[in-house]
Image (spheres, rainbow, N blue to C red):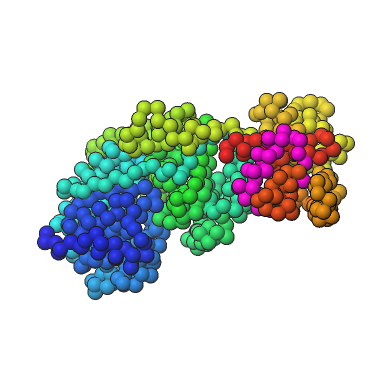
Amino acid sequence: MTTAPQPTPEALKKVLQQEFGFAEFRPGQLELIQAVLSGRDALGVLPTGGGKSLIYQLPAMMMPGVAVVVSPLIALMKDQVDAFNRRGRRRAAALHSNQSAEDARKALAQVHSGEAALLYVAPERFEFAGFRERVLALKPTLFVIDEAHCVNQWGYDFRPSYLALKEIVAALRPAPVLTLTATATPAARREILARLELIKPFVFVGPFDRPNLRFEVHPCTAQEKMQYLRTILNVSRGQGSHLVYVGRRRDADEIAAALSRAGFGAVAYHAGMDAQARRKTQEAWLSGDKPVAVATVAFGMGIDKPDVRTVVHYQHPSSLEAYYQEAGRAGRDGAPSQCITLYSTKDVSLAHFFLRNRYPSRDQVLELYARISPQGTSPDGLRLTSDELSDEQLNVALHALAEQRHVWRDEDGLFRRQDCDPSSVYISLNNLFARKKADYKRLEEVIRYCTDTDCHRTHLLRYFGEPLPEHHRCGNCSACSGGTDSLREIASLEEAGRLFKEHRSILESGGPLSPTFFARFLGASTSKKLPPKWRKLRGFGALAGLPKEQLQAIAKTVMETKAVSPATGGTLKIPRVWPARDSERKERESQEAKYRSIAADELKKRKVSRASGLAILRLASEANGALSPAEIAKRLTGDKNYEEALSDVLAMWAKGYLSTSSEAGKKLNLTSLGRTTLHKS
């Protein structure tokens, strides 16, 4: 293939700045673009957020003809077409199953007229021989396969439609082929190159490590999960956006509703919602109007939102490839962010159940084959006559038949088979069972990651082929620093505080409430001394898994922290502290009087900077309960005025980081939450 003189790196950088608005290339982008422009095949493995789309969009602006991009997600395809078209220099078009015939005709017309530089195509379209011929007739100057890991036959995200791409690659020669993925182990990379028969490809594997991401795994029971999630989101409240990944649609709806009731501003997103509802959800999250999205795994693909501070996996994923891609949506702006997995042994059983039910039995595959008519059967017709199969089982069975050419799709999209006695056809299911075995192996690797006491980051990086020294520790994961106990302690404290606030009037209706009785409520005590009506309250026994001593300590801390007068809406009495200099006495007295009775609910809403909050906690810790709020504020006035300092101290008390001592409430001690926060700093 004759290639034009290659643009210099400086010329490419100028296009980058003028057309895309970026000052510099990200790692690997320039090298891969140069390979493509020189007519060479290439494989790029770049982490989520690494800028894969630019690697083909920039060459498409510079090359003659059209670049065809195979992309598996229609929503992602639409977003990228819109973004490319906003730049205005050349156009992009798309062909997918959700289009009308008229829209598809317009897209092809744009390509034929030379107006479109990019044509996005869903991989399923290549299953039809007529469509393949139309694409070949376009004579693309570049063929791009995004999410190239989908071609891996034993891969975590294998898609049968990708198998047809090998023939397209061969037929489009000498056009170069660019393959891109975010997650591919060394073995997966070798399979991509071999299966697509790339010719002397340039391979760039970007660094998988994202130093700004903190990886945490927290073992917990099913009952504790919501407590943990509320605590995680509480810590990050007001700081960017957050993603919570769940395994089931029902979980997305229920958890989003629970978080919304708790005031977090959450939305659900899953495939069971109609297109308009999904679009509305996505826009609410992208705009920041709803900072928390609770979603199944499809959400976030291709969304470049820089300020995602937290990605939580409510259930562990089915593979580390999927996990790293989803977790990688955090911290794209380079700021510290956290990727947290809530690990429960119950979820392991559920994952095994899903795997067992993903694959059809031999008899089910044979019965499906017999139902397909030689004259053609529509996909909807197959679903109606195969109601004992889930959609996933149906797709797996159809692929097993299609890869042996027992079944194919005609130009009308109908499934057909040869006109013969079905019982006379030999159907091998060896590949199907091999895929099932590979799925179990990936699940076992996830469980090892979740239960490993060594460095979580090291586990992930080694899985993706990055060499690391023996006993390497990153210092920025729950296995290396912080552990898991702190989250359990904070979550337990917050849950107890929430229940105390919600049920306080009932708990105190029979007289003064002691920490012992509140601990019994939290632990679902069987003591007959507990009023029967307590057992009917929501949250009774919420911390039943904790030892009695810990329940007692939590109850005491919560009651000290929340020990405010219900009649006044919650107040903290601030003792008078007079300065040594008499000239300051009147000013101090007026300020003290102003803050002597402040509503706790108002103080909770006050934002305290991290630096100020930690300074307050350090002073309280060093004084060991010997300083009052006013005394702590006085010591901080070197950095800010006394009024602001006192407000910050009271806010830290109201938020549960500090508690009053038994000495008439005049001195402040660190609570368990305060001690944990100071320790983690």
Please tell me whether residue 629 belongs to the stretch shown in magenta.
yes
Residue at 60% of width from left, 47% of height from top?
610
Residue at 56% of width from left, 52% of height from top?
239
Q: Foreground residue, 360 or 178? A: 178
Taking the image as shown, residue 645 lies to the left or right of residue 302, namely: right
Residue at 53% of width from left, 41% of height from top?
314
Q: Foreground residue, 414 or 152? A: 152
Residue span colored magenta: 606-630
Taking the image as shown, residue 14 lies to the left or right of residue 298, namely: left
Residue at 41% of width from left, 44% of height from top?
210
| Image-quadrant location for residue 5 | bottom left
Please tell me whether residue 185 belongs to the stretch shown in magenta.
no
Taking the image as shown, residue 619 lies to the left or right of residue 299, namely: right
On the question of residue 372 being in view, the answer is no
Q: Position of residue 201 (x, y in %)?
A: 19, 48
On the question of residue 285 being in view, the answer is yes
| Image-quadrant location for residue 96 | bottom left
Query: In this view, which residue lies farthest toward the left?
Result: 2
Q: Foreground residue, 605 or 630? A: 630
Quadrant holding the N terminus: bottom left
